Amino acid sequence: MPLVLASASPRRARLLQDAGIPHVVAPAAVDESVRPGETPAEHVRRLAEAKAAAAAARYPDALVLGADTVVVRDGAILGKPRDAAEARSMLRSLAGRSHEVYTGVAIVGEGRLVSEVDRAEVRFAPMTDAEIDWYIATGEPYDKAGAYAVQGRASRYVEAVTGAPSTVIGLPVATVCRLLRQFEQGSQLLAASGSVVPVP
């Protein structure tokens, strides 16, 4: 059976597809609220594990991959903006500065759970209010942590990425592959040749 991706994110599915990892998509809904005193790394690891465990209950014989990503500015976790005003506030706070991105990944299967957190740093160019309004009008910020997609239209404002770009997009592929190798099924998946489930 292909890897089960416990996420509705088309970006995560595309990263797996581009890496040649067979998979099916089976989103898992969990409460993504930040707990008091929880660090960004603890937060994304907990949610990745919760998503993987929730989907694994439906697919007990498969390897299930969960992931979660947050943008962090000055220690504050920035999730997905609820509206244009929140997206505007986030983008203003990121413009002309560097910030961190944390992505947690977890794999459940064969009676085991493994998880890890990857960190990257992104430096944004300055953005005028007009540029921020233009970007919000594209609709791209709304389902993205920190209100931007590094691989999308926001790429014109990304001056540098330190770390794996796939961590910023939402799934550190090299880390996923390393974790998959810890499972017998995972090694077989990575050895598969071109058997990739198309992304809708």
Image (cartoon, grey):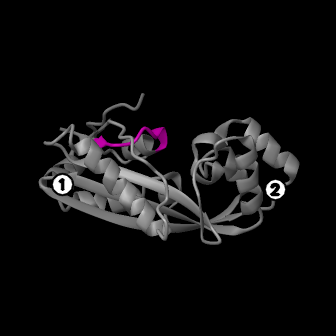
- Establish if 52 lies above or below 43: above
Amino acid tagged 1 = Ser
The reply, left or right, for residue 107 in relation to residue 39 is left
Q: Is residue 107 visible?
A: yes
Q: Which residues are magenta?
A: 4-11
Query: Can you give x and y, in whole percent of width and height, for residue 184 in the image?
Result: 12, 55
Residue 105 appears in which quarter of the rendering?
bottom left
As drawn, the label of residue 131 is: none
Q: Residues within 10 Å of mark 1 (few under 14, many from 20)?
A: some
x and y, in percent, of residue 77 in the image: 58, 62
What is the count of numbered marks?
2
Tell me if residue 7 is in the magenta stretch: yes
Image coords of residue 89 (percent x, y): 75, 54
- Cα distance, mark 1 to mark 2? 44 Å
- Disc 2: which residue: 127
Q: Residue furthest top?
A: 200
Q: Residue at x 26, y 49 (%)?
A: 53
Residue nearer the viewer, 196 or 71: 71
Tell me the residue at 39%/55% (across/down). 47
Q: Residue furthest front?
A: 36
Residue 19, x across and y down, in percent: 37, 48
Q: Secondary structure at mark 2?
A: loop
Q: Is residue 85 above or below residue 48?
A: above
- Name the residue that disc number 1 marks: 187
Q: Are marks 1 and 2 in contact (CB under 8 Å)?
A: no
Q: Is residue 190 above or below residue 23?
A: below
* 120 left or right, relative to 116: right
The quarter of the picture where the N terminus appears is top left
From this view, report whether residue 8 is shown above or below residue 49. Answer: above
Position of the C terminus by quadrant: top left
Q: Is residue 144 left or right of residue 44?
A: right
SS of the residue under disc 1: helix
